[in-house]
Image (spheres, grey):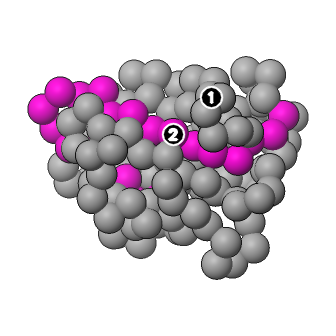
Amino acid sequence: NRTDDATAALGPPDGRCAVLRAGGTITLELSPDQRLETDGSPAADLFVELGADPPSGPYRVDVGVERHQYTTVAAGLIGSSPLDVDQHGIARFRYVRIKNRDRTTALCIDAVGSLEAPPPGTHGVE
């Protein structure tokens, strides 16, 4: 897993980070027991907000409806990024998996969220 304080990646950006060590992976369940729908437009469906320190190395973002079935929606990202999930033919997702592809630098994940916000207090981390 190689993640410190994974719950810090949930909720709005607040300056607290989940630290994903080099080569590590974090899986977040954005809305437990509920699938989030994409909007069907070219607008972003998902965002990844990184902290400023340490600077971002490359990372990959995958989404899935089930815990062990993912589709990569972005690879080689540097810095914070909005992502259009439905351009990959994905109408719904529940899980977001982020892989730090850097071999030496940790990744500071401040917030991960979707346009369709789940009810307050229902975020999950794995």
Residue 51 in the image: state x and y as whole percent.
32, 56
Which x, y percent locates residue 109? 37, 53
| Residue positioned 61% across, 33% down in the render | 68
Can you give x and y, in whole percent of width and height, for residue 1 in the image?
Answer: 33, 44
Q: Quadrant of residue 45?
A: top right
Estimate the spatial distance between the alpha carbons at disc 2 and disc 1, rounded to whole Å.
Answer: 8 Å
Q: Residue at x 80, y 56 (%)?
A: 34
Residue closest to the far left: 104
Disc 2, SS:
strand
Q: Which residue is mark 1?
A: 70
- Name the amino acid, label 1: Tyr
The picture quadrant where one finds residue 78 is top left
Q: Is residue 108 visible?
A: no
Q: Is residue 37 left or right of 97 when viewed as pictured?
A: right
Residue bounds of the magenta highlight = 91-111
- Where residue 33 appears, as percent x and y from the top left, is 77, 59
Residue where numbered disc 2 is placed: 97
Q: Can see residue 70?
A: yes
Q: Main secondary structure of the magenta part?
A: strand
Which residue is at a point 70% across and 61% down the rendered structure image? 32
Please report contact status of discs 2 and 1: CB closer than 8 Å, yes or no: yes
Residue 96 among magenta residues: yes
Residue type marked 2: Arg
Asked if the stretch drawn in magenta spans residue 27, the answer is: no
Secondary structure under tag 1 reads: strand
Residue farthest toward the front in the current orientation of the protein: 68
In the image, what residue occupies the spot 81% across and 40% down? 92
Q: With respect to residue 40, does 89 lie above or below?
A: above
